[in-house]
Image (cartoon, grey):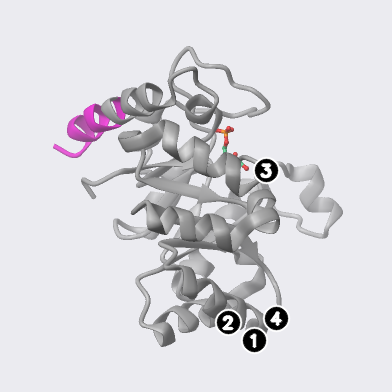
Amino acid sequence: MSQHEIIAALDVPDSKQAAETVRRIGDGVSFYKVGLELFIADGPETLRMLAGEGKKIFLDLKLHDIPRTVERATASCMRFGVDLLTIHAQGAAAMTAAAAKAVRDAGAHTKILAVTVLTSLDNTDLSAIGVTRPVGEQVLSLGKLAVSSGADGLVCSPREAAALRAALGPDALLVTPGVRPAGSAVGDQKRVATPADAIRAGATHLVVGRPIIGAADPRAAALAIREEVERAAAEHYR
Ligand code: C5P
């Protein structure tokens, strides 16, 4: 696990701004996350633009439906050559297996990532929906279920990464948002970690939004984060 990826969250409203952002970042980033806002506005156009620029794609749609629907939605995503696709682990084993089957049937290289408990939820929110165990336990339990059902990895908070790495072994992908280089604005994120912290906790991919796309020089910001990640990885994995 010596290769770590930095994924820039393309949190912009339309494909025109997406193209402009990708142009400004240039060779600073080769992997982009497209989430619901941009996908609903201009999804296919944006994904074609990214593929045309030779960029890797993390399609963050957090699919959650009956297995057949998720299988077919996943198959539709395969048209765009996405590298990472998210589903909700709460869809349970059959839904996760259906997403993995769609990837296999397409002969695609896409990796399926499961989201366990949204980081916007706390213990009180869980108990309101009938989940009585604490967030940390629920994350571990759903994470193990997802990976044993065919997911290639998880999206998780950097604070959850070490426990998940220990529980899931060396092969699972762990993709962590909430990453802030030391000294950068936290924004609305409550629990952040530096890129180096995330790597030391076992993350394989770091999702970084505003610290890159909101920077005065986004290419330079991305390259500085890459340098920190490579330094941390070299120390951690030597
Ligand atoms: O700008 P920032 O670096 O906070 O962006 C982080 C990205 O990761 C956003 O697209 C956000 O929706 C996403 N994300 C997150 N926390 C999660 C899951 C996804 O910040 N738990």
Circle 4 packing at 10 Å, graded few (<14), some (14-19), many (20+), is few
Residue 229, percent across and down?
Answer: 30, 31
Name which residue type carries label 3. Answer: Pro
Report ligand 1 position as a quadrant. Answer: top right
Circle 2 packing at 10 Å, graded few (<14), some (14-19), many (20+), is many
Mark 4 lies on residue: 66
Mark 1 lies on residue: 68
Residue 22, percent across and down?
Answer: 45, 40
Q: Residue at x 47, y 74 (%)?
A: 78
Q: Nearer the viewer, mark 4 or mark 3?
A: 3
Does the closest atom of ligand 1 sit within 8 Å of the Cβ of label 2? no
Would residue 182 be visible to someone looking at this image? yes
Circle on res. 13: 3
Q: Is residue 72 left or right of residue 107?
A: right
Does the closest atom of ligand 1 sit within 8 Å of the Cβ of label 1? no
Q: Tell me how far mark 4 sits from mark 1, CA to CA.
A: 6 Å
Name which residue type carries label 2. Answer: Glu
| Earlier residue among tags 4 and 3 | 3
Image quadrant in which the C terminus is located: top left
Q: Residue at x 62, y 40 (%)?
A: 12
Q: Which residues are magenta?
A: 228-238
Q: Tell me how far mark 2 sits from mark 3, CA to CA.
A: 27 Å
SS class, disc 2 = helix
Name which residue type carries label 1. Answer: Arg
Q: Tell me how far mark 3 sits from mark 1, CA to CA.
A: 30 Å
Asked whether 140 or 9 is in front, the reply is 9
Circle 1 packing at 10 Å, graded few (<14), some (14-19), many (20+), is some
| Earlier residue among tags 2 and 4 | 4
Mark 2 lies on residue: 71
Q: Tell me how far mark 2 sits from mark 4, CA to CA.
A: 9 Å
Name which residue type carries label 4. Answer: Ile
